[in-house]
Amino acid sequence: MTVRAVRGAVQVDSADRDAILEATAELVTEVMSRNDLTTDDVISVLFTSTPDLTAEFPALAARKIGFHDVPLMCAAEIAVPGGMPRVVRLMAHIETDRPRSLIQHVYLRGAAALRLDIAQ
């Protein structure tokens, strides 16, 4: 098995707790599905959120959908002037036999505009 990184992001509809959890769960589920992963394949996940999302830790959404034994960490994005608001990003480290070219990075909702070069 090889260690690979999978990137993703989602723009959250509003800065409230439920919206953060719902959007993050959608993002994590899509990353797992598109890359045919189980939680046993995941080494760790780093979540970041823009400074306007403070109502909940995005990692809680992953815990709620089964990431019980996976190390998770949350951090704040830097406040870049003009940056897209209300964005949760993730970088998951996984074990996989897939070559790097077949890893599907997932950018949902408005966050698709962040990486048109790699968004699937």
Image: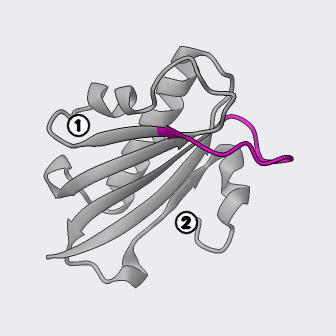
Name the side, left or right, on which 108 lies relative to 82: left
Q: Majority secondary structure of the magenta segment?
A: loop
Name the side, left or right, on which 49 lies relative to 39: right
Look at 31% across and 83% down and name the residue there. Answer: 99
Q: Residues within 10 Å of mark 2 (few under 14, many from 20)?
A: some
Residue 21 percent across, percent down from the top left: 47, 25
Q: In the rendered view of the protein, which quadrant contains the N terminus? A: bottom left
Given the image, on which type of amino acid does mark 2 rest? Gln
Q: Is residue 4 above or below residue 32?
A: below
Q: Residues within 10 Å of mark 1 (few under 14, many from 20)?
A: many
Asked if the residue at tag 2 contacts the one at tag 1, i.e. Cβ–Cβ closer than 8 Å, the answer is: no
Residue occupying the far front of the picture: 78
Look at 38% across and 59% down and name the residue there. Answer: 34
Using the image as rendered, state which of residue 67 and residue 57 is in the foreground.
57
Q: Nearer the viewer, mark 1 or mark 2?
A: 1
Secondary structure beneath label 1: loop
Secondary structure beneath label 2: loop
Residue 110 percent across, percent down from the top left: 71, 46
Given the image, on which type of amino acid does mark 1 rest? Phe
Residue 111 percent across, percent down from the top left: 67, 50
Q: Quadrant of residue 70?
A: top left
Look at 19% across and 48% down and name the residue there. Answer: 39
Look at 43% across and 37% down and name the residue there. Answer: 74
Residue occupying the far right of the picture: 82
Does the stretch in magenta take in 76? yes
The residue carrying mark 1 is 67
The residue carrying mark 2 is 120
Task: Give the magenta range.
Answer: 75-86
Q: Is residue 53 above or below residue 40?
A: above
Instruction: Give the mark, 1 or 2, whose residue is nearer the N terminus.
Output: 1
Real-space Cα distance between discs 1 and 2? Answer: 24 Å
